Amino acid sequence: MKRYAWYHTLDLGQGVVTQGVFDHRPALGHYLVPTDLSGMRCLDVGTMDGFWAFEMERRGAAEVLAIDIEDPEALDWPRSLREKTVKTLDIEKGERFELAREALGSSVKRILRPVYELDIDLGEFDFVFCGDLLAHLKDPITAVENIRNVCRGSATICDPIVRFRLGRRRALASFDGIDNFQWWALSEHALVRMMEAAGFTRVERGKPFELPTASRGSWRGLRGIVRGYV
């Protein structure tokens, strides 16, 4: 386990805990994820090491699918960062996921599929989770529409947000794609409006929270959390 640089902190049992960039365990109460998923069919979009997929299984989900991209070059890298960024976290994520799945005795199925190609051929899901992905997509709107298309219950999306001086209740976004691998920095209201635009009939908004990381950098900062209902 120690030979890998982990994205998620995972408790694999028997005293083995991976040292990830993100440790979501202290922040679980901030996420709008049902405490009881018994009998539900669930989907984790952009699973990386699988923390949320395994967490949904732990909460009783009958079936969990986890989608991700194997080839790091297939990600929406900004041209300015594509060649000079060390991509170890993405290169090894499939190996890390399988190590964690085996250690946990998990039945989660990992499927290679970008969110842009998320389609009904995978079936419908009672609950969908997508964390910290929209900021890294050139086209986050299509991603949310695809999540809605396969959702028959509710979907929770968590993403970095910014607060603009023009007001918190406006659907605003800033654009980068040069200095950071974060194309869009959305306001909290923009995250809500995106869910509504995708076709969710009701959107619940959680309280924004700080998600610390193990290292300094653009990954730190405020997260917005929304849950949309079909």
Image (tube, rainbow, N blue to C red):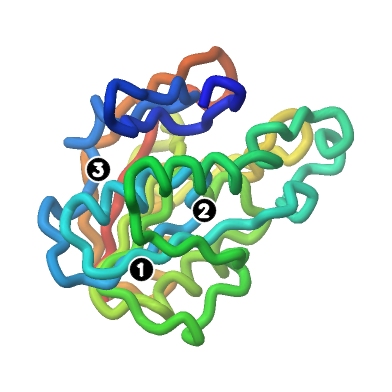
Residue density around tag 1, few if under 14, some if 14–19, many if 20 or more, within 10 Å: some
Circle 2: residue type: Gly
Identity of the residue drawn at 12% across and 51% down = 35
Q: Nearer the viewer, residue 63 or 211?
A: 63
Quarter of the rendering containing residue 222? top left
Residue 61's disc is: none
On the picture, is 139 further left or further right than 6? Answer: right
Q: Gap between marks 3 and 1, in whole Å? A: 19 Å
Mark yes or no: residue 188 visible: no
Identity of the residue drawn at 51% across and 53% down = 46
Q: Nearer the viewer, mark 1 or mark 2?
A: 2
Q: Nearer the viewer, mark 2 or mark 3?
A: 2
Quarter of the rendering containing residue 161? top left
Residue labelled with disc 1: 196
- Residue 200 rendering spot, x and y as whole percentages: 32, 73
Q: Nearer the viewer, mark 3 or mark 1?
A: 3
- Residue 54 rendering spot, x and y as whole percentages: 33, 49
- Residue 18 rendering spot, x and y as whole percentages: 43, 25
Identity of the residue drawn at 40% across and 78% down = 150
On the picture, is 162 further left or further right than 105? Answer: right
Residue labelled with disc 2: 46
Residues at discs 2 and 3 in contact (Cβ within 8 Å):
no
